[in-house]
Image (cartoon, grey):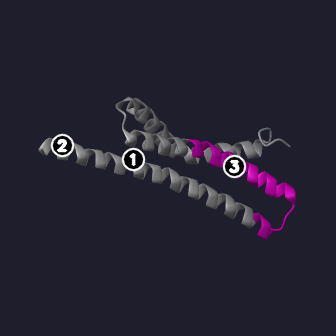
């Protein structure tokens, strides 16, 4: 049965999306703000847009990916250890991608701080 047509899986998918809603909203606002600052030519805006954009994409991919992996594991008929391994790998992958999005935001912060320091040194001269 198609996962979209199954009411139980659709309910589970919507519940997972609700869990991602706060991050989704912050990421969406962050993307809009960084697109607005894109014309300033700041490297920080690019890093921040990459971080918020990846976070926004993950808010959609994580619930869909979890449902697809769950369906794949359950239809495969594997043992409990195989199921646990599949979910562990997927959870680790999502965690690494979240860390990459936070790393991009960290680079944006560092780029903005360096730009501020350089501007401060120029004004002192």
**Sequence-wise first label, 2 or 3:** 3
Query: Which disc, if any, is residue 108?
Result: 1
Residue at the spot of label 2: 122
Query: Which disc, if any, is residue 65?
Result: 3
Q: Does 100 sit above or below residue 10?
A: below
Q: Does 93 sit above or below residue 51?
A: below
Query: Which disc, if any, is residue 40?
Result: none
User: Where's the N terminus, which quadrant?
Assistant: top right
- Asked if the residue at tag 3 contacts the one at tag 2, i.e. Cβ–Cβ closer than 8 Å, the answer is no
Q: Residue furthest left?
A: 125
* Numbered disc in front, either 1 or 2: 2
Residue 83 as seen in the image, left or right of residue 45: right
**Sequence-wise first label, 1 or 3:** 3
Residue 61: % across, % down: 64, 45
Q: Is residue 79 magenta?
A: yes
Tell me the distance, in whole angstroms, between the alpha carbons under discs 1 and 2. 21 Å
Which range of residues does the magenta coloring cover? Answer: 57-83
Residue 112: % across, % down: 32, 45
**Sequence-wise first label, 1 or 2:** 1
Residue 115, image quadrant: top left
């Amino acid at each position: 049965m198609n996962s979209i047509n199954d009411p139980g899986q659709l309910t589970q998918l919507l519940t997972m999306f609700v869990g991602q809603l706060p991050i989704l909203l912050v990421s969406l606002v962050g993307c809009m703000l960084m697109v607005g600052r894109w014309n300033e030519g700041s490297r920080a805006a690019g890093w921040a847009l990459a971080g918020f954009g990846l976070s926004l994409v993950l808010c959609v991919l994580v619930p869909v990916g979890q449902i697809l992996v769950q369906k794949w594991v359950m239809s495969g008929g594997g043992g409990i250890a195989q199921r646990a391994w599949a979910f562990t790998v997927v959870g680790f992958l999502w965690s690494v991608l979240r860390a990459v999005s936070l790393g991009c935001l960290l680079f944006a912060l560092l780029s903005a701080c360096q730009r501020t320091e350089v501007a401060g040194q120029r004004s002192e001269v």
